[in-house]
Image (tube, rainbow, N blue to C red):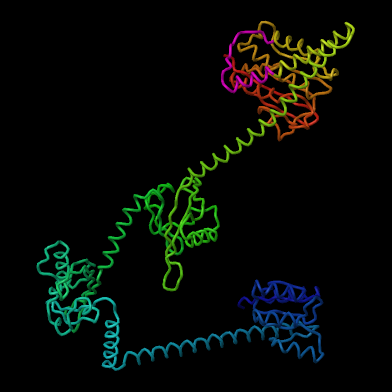
Amino acid sequence: METFKVLIVEDEIINAKVLQNFLEDKGYVVMGVLTTGEAAVDFVAKSKPDIILMDIELDDQLNGIEAAEIINKNDNIPILYLTSQTEKSVVDKARETKPIGYVIKPFSPLQLEITMEMARKKLKVDQELKNYQQYLEHLVVDRTRELLAEVEMHKDARQFAIENEIKLKAITTAANDAIVLFDEYGRITFWNKAAESMFLYANDDIINQNIRVLFSSDNDNDGFTKGLEVIQHAIDNKLNGENIEIIATRADGIEIPVEMSMASVDIDGDNNIICIVRDISQRKADLEEISRFKLIADLANYGLAVTDANGQFLYINKYFAELLEYSQDQIIGQSFFNITPNIKRSKVVKYVAEASNLQGGEGREVILTSKSKQNIPVMINSVIIKDRYEQPEFYAVSAIDIRERKEYEENLLRAKRLAEDSDRMKTAFLSTISHELRTPLNAIIGFSELIKITEVSMEDILDFNEEIHNSGNHLLSIVEDILDISLLESKDLKILPVEFSLNNLMQKLFDKFKSNIRYDNNSITLQWKGNLKEGKDLFFADNSKFEQIFSKLIDNAYKFSQTGVIEFGYIQHNKDGLIDFYVKDQGKGINKGKLTDIFESFKQEDDGNNRAHDGLGLGLSIVNQLLDLMNGEIYVESELEKGSIFTFNIKQV
């Protein structure tokens, strides 16, 4: 038995299993056993069984009849119902789906076998009938086509010739190009109205004349000679000649450039040449104009290009191509949108359209991308050339490189910002120095006046003198900072390197700052560390500038700390001998956004009237500039409320 594929849809598992075993024993292929109508619809959509055994009474959303309706609509698979239903309305509803048969539950093996065999044979017979019907339909169609072809072939030959003559006359009359027919002797046997208009000969005057009459006999140029040779070659060899450009002569003696294409044809056994002639005077003039345009365009110091309606380059001048880092030949045929990848196509079209509508003045600024992916700002202007339907046909685009202008504008903005910053810094400096100078001067003058106008004890005089001394030192420190920053910025400060002991310098700094008389934070512990022994700690640099750098950093640590430890010193790294110097505190820390600002002149983390500490804001700027002068670098790490660590290194001279 031929392979016959069966799908079982039965929600009673035992019945379904019995059916499957029985059918497989009889040689049928059971593709699947499903329990719902939905599953049956999905299965049939993917796999096509030859027949479906469908239980009418299924418990899910679709019963067997509803599932069969969907399957018939989409795939038309033969269905054999399994049912114990005898209710007339159900049977009538099932009959509307046109099943191939019914198997009544409970079914006997013999009944099922007979029903399945009848269904299989019926399907086979139906298929054979369908195939035979298709064969007959194809046979009728083929025979009808053959008969129509025979009828067409046996049309009246004379009528066919008349129709062709009418068509040929209509075509040649309507043609814009001159059509000339001449025989193997060069005698003109036919030409159309366009030929009369081109050469100014009447039809009766030119027929039977030699084709050479259309060309000047005294024309000795190479093009004329070659043209006549090609014509003669086409006559002698019955070949299609190549397109040639030649100078023709009108009846009034005026010469015109023409393009000729020829083909050899047999008419009633005689060799004839049909010749299509086009007046190319305008084309020649256009080409000359284009040549002049290209010459001028390639000398221009701005970009010029022409694209089609889709943005494809038809022409680009040398300047524009070199701006994009291409040769002219490389970019012809590419899309304009390929050089504007960072701008949406719709926006580019909009920019070009807007630039085309401007009445003079600048167009739109666009960023182009070169071959090396470099962004190039340009100012584009364009002209839209429209067709007769007022639709864009070509775009003529000019582009001016504005990189220098953009750089100039950026420099102006940068200069403006610097000037504004300088003005703000000057104002801040004047405000700060006014305050910083008055504070120690007020103390000096005030305590001096007290000593002069009042009777005070020697103990008070000593206290006043201490305050005057401290204020004087503070004032001296301010003046020294101003002088130092002035010398640094004028590049007048000199470096005088000597060899000195790092450990001695660290101890000197410790002794200088351990008393902490300037700031009211005596709970701070000061300590220094270094990992080089005496004699191994020699360093070659400007020791006074070196001490000044450490002094500024330690003073800064005291200024912004209230408690904890201030540690300073150095670490030599054994692997490369590099020495890192550092000052570390446990103070208030620095906001990350201010880490670069603190090294600028007159800048503090807290600016203006809200500053928590005195000073001009020159300390870290002096440190930074001294390190620059000594080929050194400084780094800062800081965390708010946990402290800061300043690390620097200096290249020994």
When asked about the image quadrant of residue 220, the answer is bottom left
When asked about the image quadrant of residue 565, the answer is top right
Residue 598 x, y percent position in the rendering: 69, 29
Task: Name, please, the residue furthest toward the front.
Answer: 453
In the picture, which quadrant includes the C terminus?
top right
Task: Name, please, the residue furthest toward the left.
Answer: 218
Q: Residue at x 45, y 71 (%)?
A: 390
Report the label total: 0
Q: Residue at x 33, y 55 (%)?
A: 294
In the picture, which quadrant includes the N terminus?
bottom right
Q: Is residue 16 above or below residue 150?
A: above
Residue 202 x, y percent position in the rendering: 17, 82
Q: Is residue 228 visible?
A: yes
Q: Is residue 269 visible?
A: no
Q: Which residues are magenta?
A: 479-502
Task: Look at the image and say whether residue 499 sits in the magenta stretch.
Answer: yes
Residue 160 x, y percent position in the rendering: 29, 90
Query: For this view, does 460 lie left or right of residue 215?
Result: right
User: Front-most of 103 and 221?
Assistant: 221
Task: Look at the image and say whether residue 592 sits in the magenta stretch.
Answer: no
Query: For this view, does 194 lie left or right of residue 454?
Result: left
Residue 274 x, y percent position in the rendering: 21, 77
